[in-house]
Amino acid sequence: MSNINGKVKVVFETQEFSSGFQKREFVLTTDDKYPQDIKFEVVKDNCTKLNELAEGMDVTVYYNLRGNEYNGKYYVNLQAWKWDASAATLPPTSVESDTDDIPF
């Protein structure tokens, strides 16, 4: 298990395959000195959960590194399984001022 912080750059639509398998991808721009665009994927039920993310949100993504071989070629995927949005990315709530009700 690993995690990484960054800003959501793009969230792609769900891909459905003939076998019934679903996956969805998103890209995170890291907060490093030299920012990197990192693509993650989610599968199954997490495809709809990904609707929680919006472009520009600051998030911490928890992921597993997955690798496989297919027809003599090797592939690596970063499979996200959890993400936490930063409170700083939520819109500020409106607080009404009580300055009109000064008791003196």
Image (cartoon, helix red, strand yellow):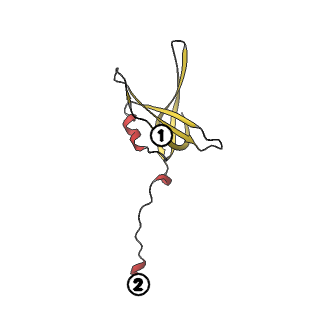
Q: Quadrant of residue 4?
A: top right
The residue depicted at 41 percent of the width and 67 percent of the height is: 95
Judge by depth and name the residue closer to the eye, 32 or 63: 32
* Residue at 51 percent of width and 39 percent of height: 61
Residue 7 locus on image (x, y percent): 53, 45
The three-letter code of the residue at mark 1 reads: Val
Mark 1–mark 2 Cα distance, whole angstroms, equals 51 Å
Q: Which residue is mark 1?
A: 10
Name the kind of residue labelled 2 in the image: Pro
Q: Quick check: 60 left or right of 49?
A: right
Quadrant (top left/top right/bottom left/bottom right) for the C terminus: bottom left
Q: Which residue is at a point 55% across and 41% down the rendered structure image?
A: 29
Between residue 2 and residue 57, name the one nearer to us: 57
Residue at the (37%, 33%) spot, across then down:
45
Is 76 situated above or below 13?
above
Element under disc 1: strand
Give the image quarter of residue 98.
bottom left
Disc 2 element: loop
Disc nearer the start of the sequence (1/2)? 1
Q: Quadrant of the N terminus?
A: top right
Tell me residue 3's x, y (percent): 55, 38
Residue designated by label 2: 103
Q: How many labels were placed on the picture?
A: 2
Tag 2: Cα neighbours inside 10 Å, few (<14), some, or many (≥20)?
few
In the rendering, at what x and y percent does residue 38 appear? 55, 35
**Farthest residue toward the top?**
71
Extreme right residue here?
Answer: 33
